[in-house]
Image (spheres, rainbow, N blue to C red):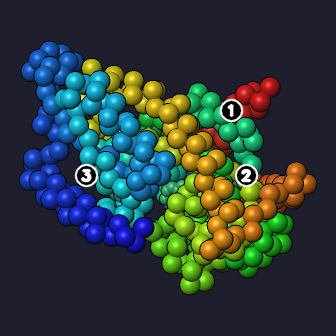
Amino acid sequence: MFLKKKKLLMLSLLLGFSMILAACGGGSSEQTGSESDTGDSGSGEETYHWRFVTEEMQGQVQYEYAVEFANRLNEKSDGRITMDVFEFGGLGSEVNQVEQLQDGLVEFAIVSPGFTGTMVTEGQLFALHFLFTEDLELNQQILNTSEALNVHLAEKYKQHNIQPLAFWHEGAMQWTGSRELRTPDDFTNLKFRTQESPLILESYKAYGANPTAMSWGELYTGLQQGVVEGQENPIFFIEDAKFHEVQDHMTISNHNIYVAMTTVNTDFFAGLPEDIQALILETVEEMRPVAYEIQKELNESLLDSIVNNEKHPTAVIELTDEERAAFKAAAEPVKEFFVSEVVDEDGKMILEMLEEEIEAAMK
Ligand code: 6CS
């Protein structure tokens, strides 16, 4: 990651330049699509150039998704739509990226709800441990079809100029720690890194940990220097970001799934000609199984590289059903906290509807 600093600086300069252009009225599209002189809703021969920012690096799920998304859209539009895809880091922290999307400095972004918790409080439901099933494929189907998420939660984001086009997951979440994490007691006073959402912090307080929010850009050094002693992420991310090099233990806990959203700036999308909107939505649909396959392959293949790493050995354990049940019981009050302290009636309705959808999917 540190070898890529020069590249990130280049990206940063590049974006700085396009921001200046945007501020001068140049924008990023040759045609913004708000008006077309070729018909009521068609785009004619107009060309478009957009920015797509991700929270990950080359070779990681979000970035590979975005590149494939951009390629498909380019092909479908016969080359009229081009996109610059940005790795994480060049445009600031994950939270900065959300702001850039809202301000229209980038048109598209992959956003993890964990970075929007103070703004869209309802989106924090993804922080609830053991909410989804243990079947990753089924979980993806639920994310694809859920009315609670795709209609009601999406509406909450749209009010902030963030339009979720798809909810998808990057695999099951696991823990790493400077000590073995097998029971809730093992979390007592553990300095645990989380994303920004207050409910994620609450989830770890429920286990007795001492959680701290931090960007993942700081996490390797944070773990190495003992500023934090544990973290959660899917296997592919733990391996690729090399967190296992500075953590002696990993627990296959499957306590949650890592949800990501493909998002677009709401005003920008509304201003596009209908045929261009249709191409984007078609691409979003096509990408659902692609995203699933990318994460599956990376999560499955990279576990071995953690287990067999002799230079940086990591003891890997898997929770038994009984051990998971102890965490499940400890996590239960967090759901009550979410409903009674964090969200209003709408948020409660969204969670209840999602729970019903999950239950129905399991039958
Ligand atoms: O832990 C994080 O914050 C990062 N984890 C993943 C899987 N993607 C991006 C995110 O920022």
N-terminal of the pair, mark 1 or mark 2, is 1
Q: Position of residue 136 (x, y in %)?
A: 68, 39
Q: Position of residue 88 (x, y in %)?
A: 39, 59
- Residue at left 73%, top 53%? 255
Above/below status of 105 relative to 241:
above
Which part of the image, by quadrant, shows the N terminus?
bottom left
- Residue at left 82%, top 57%? 319
Report the number of discs: 3
Position of 282 compared to 314: left or right? Answer: left
Q: Which residue is mark 3?
A: 105
Position of 270 compared to 131: left or right? Answer: left
- Crowding near pointer 1: few (<14 within 10 Å), some, many (20+)? some
Kindly identify the amino acid type of the residue bearing the numbered disc 3.
Leu
Q: Is mark 2 within 8 Å of ligand 1?
A: no
Q: Which residue is mark 2?
A: 254
In the image as oriented, which residue stretches furthest toward the bottom? 225
Q: Position of residue 95 (x, y in %)?
A: 42, 61
Q: Is residue 288 visible?
A: yes
- Crowding near pointer 3: few (<14 within 10 Å), some, many (20+)? many
* Front in this rendered view, residue 121 or 249: 249
